Image (cartoon, helix red, strand yellow):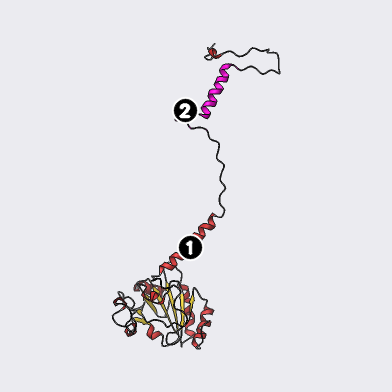
């Protein structure tokens, strides 16, 4: 029979074995064993990790996805407003009653690959980087010239291709413009090289003149920082209205009809 290694810690108390109501007495060794087990649980030896109660699961935030979408929308707006180089003078385009400032820029379907827009005014305003000659003097089939466009009522669309989806607006202008032979239509595409702009023009089958504003000089000149922006100007270049954002074909047609009749676009 194996020797009891806890016998020196005491013997169990004697009691009548025939009493069913009386629980068997515990030995001193059993009590000490329980104490040691409890101590190990509460204060373990170095290197051992105490048992921790399970953590209560934290409820998830059911609106977290909404916050994420709002953040993405904010980033999208930031990208949109910074995609067009802008000096900070304004982002809403020329105001009603303002006369459009002069500019000329390479035609997207032309061959002037290394040229930037000329924004030198006829009265000599502008730095040397604006052009060595006034913009109105830059004529020919390779350039789009505001001074030529403003000889008739003008519908001018400003757009970018990066960080925005403005091409469909030009598609709508292209579809309805032939109804108004007495009105000039043109597009200023900012931030693209001429060759890249030409690919877009040919892929979408645009036939209206598209000016390439590679370095953003024309959009800066007109205070444009939103895409698309559509300017309705009377003969001579006086602005009747500037519309921000997309317009339906019906809206374009109605505004152009008012413009062609000499009335402010509404």
Secondary structure, mark 2, is: loop
Q: CA distance from mark 2 to mark 1?
A: 54 Å
> Which residues are drawn in magenta?
26-51
Identify which residue, 155 or 239, lies in the foreground.
239
**Badge 1 local density, few (<14 within 10 Å), some, or many (20+)?**
few
Residue 143: x and y, percent? Answer: 34, 81
Residue 186: x and y, percent? Answer: 42, 80
Identify which residue, 250 or 124, lies in the foreground.
124
- The residue singled out by tag 2 in the image is 45
Q: Circles 2 and 1: CB distance less than 8 Å?
A: no
Depicted 56 relative to depicted 141: above or below: above
Quarter of the image where one finds residue 163 = bottom left
Residue 53: x and y, percent? Answer: 55, 36
Which numbered dot is residue 43? none
Is 43 a magenta residue?
A: yes
Q: Quadrant of the N terminus?
A: top right
The residue depicted at 57 percent of the width and 16 percent of the height is 28
Is 150 a magenta residue?
A: no
Residue 51: x and y, percent? Answer: 52, 33
- The residue singled out by tag 1 in the image is 74
Depicted 135 relative to depicted 13: above or below: below
Secondary structure, mark 1, is: helix
The residue depicted at 47 percent of the width and 65 percent of the height is 77
Quarter of the image where one finds residue 103 = bottom left
Identify which residue, 97 or 219, lies in the foreground.
97
**Badge 2 local density, few (<14 within 10 Å), some, or many (20+)?**
few
Which numbered disc, 2 or 1, marks the residue that appears first in the sequence?
Answer: 2
Number of numbered markers = 2
Residue at the far top: name it.
1
């Amino acid at each position: 029979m194996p020797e009891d290694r806890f016998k020196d810690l005491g013997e169990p108390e004697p009691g009548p074995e025939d009493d069913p109501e009386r629980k068997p007495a515990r030995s001193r060794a059993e009590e000490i064993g329980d104490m040691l087990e409890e101590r190990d649980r509460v204060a373990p030896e170095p290197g051992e990790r105490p048992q921790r109660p399970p953590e209560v699961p934290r409820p998830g935030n059911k609106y977290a996805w909404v916050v994420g979408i709002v953040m993405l929308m904010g980033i999208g707006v930031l990208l949109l407003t910074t995609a067009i180089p802008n000096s900070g003078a304004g982002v809403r385009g020329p105001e009603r009653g303002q006369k459009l400032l002069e500019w000329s820029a390479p035609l997207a379907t032309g061959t002037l690959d290394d040229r930037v827009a000329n924004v030198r005014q006829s009265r000599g305003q502008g730095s040397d980087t604006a052009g060595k000659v006034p913009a109105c003097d830059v004529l020919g089939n390779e350039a789009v010239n505001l001074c030529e466009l403003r000889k008739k009522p003008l519908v001018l669309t400003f757009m970018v291709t990066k960080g925005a989806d403005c091409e469909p607006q030009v598609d709508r202008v292209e579809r309805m413009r032939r109804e108004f032979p007495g009105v000039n239509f043109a597009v200023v595409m900012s931030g693209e090289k001429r060759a890249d702009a030409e690919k877009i023009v040919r892929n979408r089958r645009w036939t209206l003149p598209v000016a390439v504003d590679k370095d953003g000089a024309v959009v800066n000149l007109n205070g444009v920082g939103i895409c698309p922006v559509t300017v309705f100007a009377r003969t001579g270049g006086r602005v009747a209205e500037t519309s921000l954002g997309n317009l339906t074909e019906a809206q374009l047609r109605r505004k152009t009809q008012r413009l062609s009749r000499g009335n402010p676009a509404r």
